[in-house]
């Protein structure tokens, strides 16, 4: 799926008597103009009462607005800022997302909706990140390797950037493991090598497909970032009409294979307290590859 906002889909006018207050219909009839039914506004949908007594529902596969801390609606904004407690969070996104401000790697990512949450941890200490728009870069989490966490309007992306061929030989890259825990959720294997985070009623609050790994054989050598990348992604919040929308930021690090890139699909390994993947070592270290490999496990 291509990055960026997906088209908004508008339903034709639909009669929905009794679902909203009569006042919106009366105001629309009196003014001759549609009136929004504010009580039915969501991140993804907007309902208008029409002068002819019908309603028009407009839905989008990506969030058009999000709730602010004060309870009002604001435009989505994944730009990262530092909180008073030292953690890093995006300004205005659908889910409750925060990154570590450095220190204990076990507190790397927390993603929540309501009282349900998933937490993922890095095995070791994290340096203080450098913030650039929606991306936090933690330098040298391994020798020659940077960790990048990028917020999106519906989740986040994680990328390990291995900057040299020598760094690619690190045995710690042969089995990339993150600690995983859920609050009110159980993390279990999903279909096709993916994973799911289930609530007490076995509903998938977060989910993801198998990991994808790719090189940069098709990248522009003048602009591509050299290195090996591993990426965990969380991108779709519950309530999204599509359930599989892509919320990537246009200025984020490369998060999908480009034209001409070699790819490999790898199941995400899920245990009681970890999620991870084993990269394709031939693609990671092969002499014939173009330097720059991405690995993508995905929770959403």
Image (cartoon, helix red, strand yellow):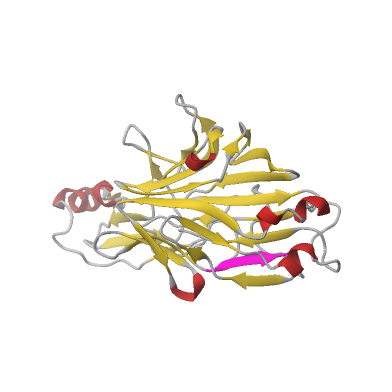
Position of residue 215 measured from the top left corner of the image (x, y, whole percent): 74, 64
Position of residue 236 measured from the top left corner of the image (x, y, whole percent): 45, 57
Q: Nearer the viewer, residue 18 or 246?
A: 246
At x 59%, y 37%, the residue is 126
Residue 154, placed above or below residue 263: above
Position of residue 29 measured from the top left corner of the image (x, y, whole percent): 22, 53
Position of residue 114 measured from the top left corner of the image (x, y, whole percent): 30, 46
Please, which residue is most extreme toward the top here?
84
In which quadrant is the C terminus drawn?
bottom left
Boundaries of the magenta span: 210-217
At x 33%, y 55%, the residue is 185
Q: Nearer the viewer, residue 58 or 67?
A: 67
Please, which residue is most extreme toward the front here?
171
Res 177 quadrant in image:
bottom right
Res 201 quadrant in image:
bottom left
Q: Is residue 286 left or right of residue 245?
A: right
Look at the image and tell me whether residue 51 can be seen.
yes
Residue 4, placed above or below residue 212: above
Look at the image and tell me whether residue 243 can be seen.
no
In which quadrant is the N terminus drawn?
bottom right
Q: Is residue 215 within the magenta segment?
A: yes
Residue 57, placed above or below residue 225: below
Q: Is residue 120 left or right of residue 15?
A: right
Q: Nearer the viewer, residue 295 or 246?
A: 295
Q: Is residue 228 left or right of residue 159?
A: right
At x 86%, y 52%, the residue is 222
Q: Is residue 111 within the magenta segment?
A: no
């Amino acid at each position: 799926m291509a990055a960026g906002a997906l088209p908004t889909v508008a339903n034709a006018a639909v009669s929905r008597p009794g679902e909203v207050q009569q006042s919106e219909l009366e105001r629309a009839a009196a003014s001759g103009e549609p009136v929004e039914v504010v009580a039915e506004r969501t991140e993804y949908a907007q309902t208008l009462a029409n002068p002819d007594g019908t309603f028009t529902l407009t839905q989008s596969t990506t969030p058009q607005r999000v709730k602010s801390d004060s309870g009002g609606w604001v435009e989505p904004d994944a730009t990262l800022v530092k909180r008073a407690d030292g953690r890093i969070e995006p300004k205005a996104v659908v889910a409750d997302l925060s990154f570590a401000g450095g220190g204990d790697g076990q507190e790397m990512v927390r993603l929540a909706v309501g009282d349900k949450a998933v937490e993922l941890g890095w095995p070791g200490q994290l340096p203080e990140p450098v913030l650039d728009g929606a991306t936090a870069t933690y330098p040298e989490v391994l020798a020659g390797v940077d960790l990048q966490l990028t917020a999106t309007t519906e989740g986040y992306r994680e990328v390990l950037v291995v900057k040299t061929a020598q760094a690619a030989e690190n045995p710690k890259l042969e089995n990339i493991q993150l600690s995983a825990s859920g609050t009110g959720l159980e993390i279990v294997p999903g279909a096709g090598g993916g994973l799911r985070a289930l609530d007490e009623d076995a509903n998938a609050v977060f989910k993801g497909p198998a990991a994808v790994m790719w090189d940069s054989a098709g990248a522009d050598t003048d602009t591509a970032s050299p290195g090996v990348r591993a990426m965990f992604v969380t991108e779709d919040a519950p309530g999204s009409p599509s359930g599989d929308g892509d919320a990537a930021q246009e200025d984020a690090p490369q998060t999908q294979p480009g034209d001409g890139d070699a790819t490999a699909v790898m199941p995400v390994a899920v245990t009681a307290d970890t999620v991870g993947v084993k990269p394709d070592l031939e693609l990671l270290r092969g002499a014939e590859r173009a330097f720059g490999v991405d690995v993508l496990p995905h929770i959403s």
